[in-house]
Amino acid sequence: MKKLLAFLLIFGWAVQAFSQVKGVNNTLGKNYQIPSTILKDTVTIQVYLPRNYQKSKKSYATLYLLDGQWFFPHGVSAQIGYTQRWQTSDTPEFIVVGITTNDDKRWGWSESQATEFSDFLEKELITYVERTFRTTQERMLFGWEATGGFVIKTLTYKPALFDAYFAASPTPIYSLYFPMYKKHFKALTQRLSKANSLKNRFLYIGAAENDYPAHYGIANLVKLLNEKAPKDFRWVYRKMKETAHEMTAYQTIFQGIKSFYYNYLPLTFNSIAEFEKLGGVPYIKTYYDQRAKRFGFNDAKELEKAWQATMRNITLIAVGDNDYPAFDRLYKEFKSRKLLETSFMPHAISYARFYLMHNQPQKAMEINQFLLKKFAKRAAPYNMAGKIYEKLHKPTKAQQYYEQAVKMAKKSDRFRLSQYEENLSDFLAKQKKK
């Protein structure tokens, strides 16, 4: 009976407690009604401001999303993911503006309607946003499917209106399937041939593997860009694997923003081949010069940290690829820039190990002598010294350092103690056989 009463009391308390829990509205940004003289209509927009907007006096770039009724949350998600998730942002903070597009009008981009809507963007909406919020006047425009086609039209006829154009599965674009759009395609061809007409503009095109029927026009568009795009116009085309037409929008938003701000983060390479293709060490300098000019990263200490990150990245890639000529060349190149002094201990140990693996014990010793001074209380450099002296056929020295590594690991480096004990045991076993 007592247990039953206790249960009923707890159950009653729980029911009462949960009955007092209330939900609150969870909203992303604010909605605004924009009366348009040009469209003779009222347009609903959604606006999301950066987290630090109210606390700062900074101005921000703006991402404009057509079909905001669907894609505004994804623009916000990209903004949060790139600027709030880590201590270091992947991109600058930016304002997100979603533009509601009526479904019955999405496909109605006749010549006059497209002109009207682009005039609305230029003369009414952008004017309102830049008068109401602190903006840098750097603008990005996104559209999917029919509104993606409008993005391409805007790039063709008003390229200066936006700095970046993100088009997901853009359609319709001229092809045998869409012959009626030949005029617009010809206009884009002429735009591409005009000097400086697309200078400093950026276009990102995202498409599904089987993007019927959009792929007909996209194939034509990509062929044209490959043949005619000027060098000062940067563009990216990405065919998305295992992605349906309906899903290209989300990836295009995220990847388009990241590609537009490609030089915001410290430079990294994916391979030695990529490093050499882009121009090697001179390219690193060009990258950081352009990065400083674009984003104002002029602090000497921060610039040096970025350089060090890039040097470690490409040097460790050479180690991972077992590319000794590239590694030796890079290590010598970066030595004067204090690569060793600014490397983390595991990375520097990797450099010494790599030289030793390629039968260069003297070069390995040079690195390890530095580590023995800088990390005198860590076991790893002593263990590496044991390996180097063993390679140099100096068993007495090798044993001393192997034993010292075990001794120090017992004090502060127990994570690798078993490894160092095994190295010492293997060495002693080999000595007994001699």
Image (spheres, rainbow, N blue to C red):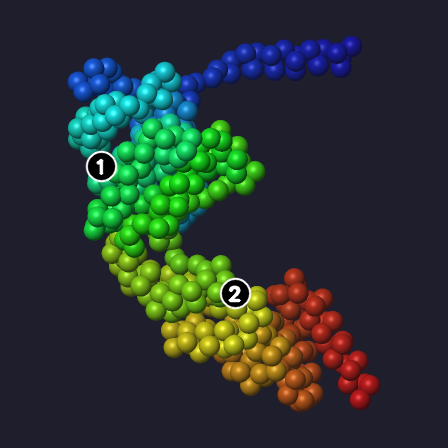
Q: Whole-percent x and y of residue 344?
A: 49, 66
Of 356 and 286, which appears nearest the observer? 286
- Classify 10 Å Cα crowding around label 1: few (below 14), some (14-19), many (20 and above): some
Up-down relation of residue 120 to residue 182 (above or below): above
Q: Residue at x 52, y 71 (%)?
A: 348
Q: Identify the residue under disc 2.
A: 317
Q: Is residue 49 shown to the viewer in this render?
A: no
Q: Whole-percent x and y of residue 307?
A: 38, 64
Q: Is residue 349 left or right of residue 417?
A: left
Q: Whole-percent x and y of residue 257?
A: 37, 42
Q: Residue at x 79, y 80 (%)?
A: 429
Of 207 and 330, which appears nearest the observer? 207
Three-letter code, disc 1:
Lys
Q: Residue at x 47, y 30 (%)?
A: 213
Q: Identify the residue under disc 1.
A: 158
Q: Residue at x 34, y 28 (%)?
A: 180
Q: Callout 1: helix, strand or loop?
A: loop
Q: Is residue 345 left or right of residue 180?
A: right
Up-down relation of residue 287 to residue 122 (above or below): below
**What is the CA distance from the residue labelled 2 to the residue labelled 1?**
43 Å
Of 7 and 263, which appears nearest the observer? 263
- Classify 10 Å Cα crowding around label 2: few (below 14), some (14-19), many (20 and above): some
Up-down relation of residue 119 to residue 12 (above or below): below
Looking at the rendered image, the quarter that the C terminus falls into is bottom right
